[in-house]
Image (cartoon, rainbow, N blue to C red):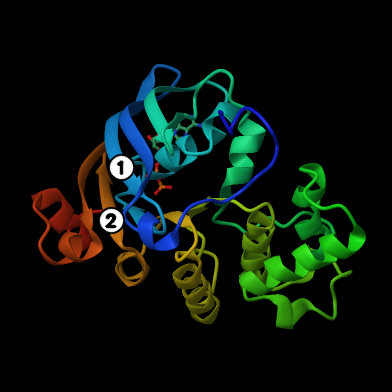
Amino acid sequence: MNTLSKAPTITRSGDASLENARTKFQCRDVKVHYGDFEALHGINIDIPDRGVTAFIGPSGCGKSTFLRTFNRMNDTITGARVSGEILMDGQDIYAPSLDPVLLRARVGMVFQKPNPFPKSIYDNIAYGPKIHGMTNSKAELDELVEKSLRRAGLWDEVKDRLKLSGTGLSGGQQQRLVIARAIAVSPEVILMDEPASALDPIATAKLEALIEELKQNYCIVIVTHSMAQAARISDKTAFFHLGDLIEYDTTETIFTKPSDSRTEDYISGRTG
Ligand SMILES: Nc1ncnc2c1ncn2[C@@H]1O[C@H](COP(=O)(O)OP(=O)(O)OP(=O)(O)O)[C@@H](O)[C@H]1O
């Protein structure tokens, strides 16, 4: 059964220990055009499940463009065109029969600027589960809201003000609220596009601790401009340059013995 195009039931499956080495996404010759401009020139990469993969590279090299291909967010950009093949758990996520709304529940996204809905903290989390018909009663919904906020490390800070607006939280809290909102619909993947760039060092540390914990259960792909952050939190790192994937390896290898001089120049701060 093609779970992406059929029932809205969103389930996780598999044994965590077995899935450590599993591939979540297989990308073959992925190109993205904006009109006539080719932003990505044919990317081949396998993204592992249950771990953090970092995309690094100079501004404009295509990191965000590539990240958006994993939940078809490029579909929403006028003139953007994706070609090649992206398989998620072996299923073509660009198949015409696929429902992008269901895909985006399975592949959540967190942006640079925290973007809570202008609704209460509670409603920010409850919104997705309601749309997807995931709960049968108010009590179940309450439980899911609490569980999601707990998993995002935010429950203790907000449990007494669930009815207040999500936009009234601090930047770091808003970012964790957005992560809780993504978690609420039981995603398998969380894409993060420079999620800490608007946060102070303390909020960044909390976010990184959260990512460290979430990676036990989710495939996380993060775009970051911070080499230190990539080195701290990711298991694998992909270095992009001018629309090409130059090098992809364990984070340790990329940061200690990169094989391409362009990678070395970038991570050592000589370019970028
Ligand atoms: N909506 C768009 N329309 C046209 N061109 C775009 C669009 N979005 C991105 N581009 C171009 O595609 C290329 C890749 O951009 P992208 O934002 O993916 O790079 P990036 O590596 O994420 O950059 P940054 O680190 O600055 O966020 C750039 O040349 C950019 O100008």
- Marking on residue 15: none
Residue 264 location (% of width, % of height): 14, 57
Three-letter code for the amino acid on which mark 2 is drawn: Thr
Task: State which quarter of the image contains the N terminus.
Answer: top right
Residue 229 location (% of width, % of height): 36, 69
Residue 150 location (% of width, % of height): 67, 74
The residue singled out by tag 1 in the image is 46
Residue located at (65% from left, 45% from top): 10
Residue located at (76% from left, 43% from top): 132
**Depicted 106 relative to depicted 209: above or below:** above
Identify which residue, 134 or 148, lies in the foreground: 134
Q: CA distance from mark 2 to mark 1?
A: 12 Å
Residue located at (59% from left, 32% from top): 4
Callout 2: SS: strand
**Depicted 16 relative to depicted 43: above or below:** below
Q: Of label 2 and label 1, which has the lower sequence position?
A: 1
**Position of 48 compared to 203: left or right?**
left
Residue 268 visible in the picture: no
**Depicted 64 relative to depicted 167: above or below:** above
Q: Is mark 2 within 8 Å of ligand 1?
A: no
The residue singled out by tag 2 in the image is 237
Camera-side mark, 2 or 1: 1
Residue 266 visible in the picture: yes
Residue located at (48% from left, 68% from top): 211
Crowd tier of the residue under label 1, counting other residues whose Cα lies within 10 Å: few below 14, some 14–19, many 20 or above: some
Crowd tier of the residue under label 2, counting other residues whose Cα lies within 10 Å: few below 14, some 14–19, many 20 or above: many
**Depicted 39 relative to depicted 218: above or below:** above
Three-letter code for the amino acid on which mark 1 is drawn: Asp
Q: Are marks 2 and 1 in contact (CB under 8 Å)?
A: no
**Position of 269 compared to 20: left or right?**
left
**Position of 261 compared to 248: left or right?**
left
**Position of 197 compared to 159: left or right?**
left
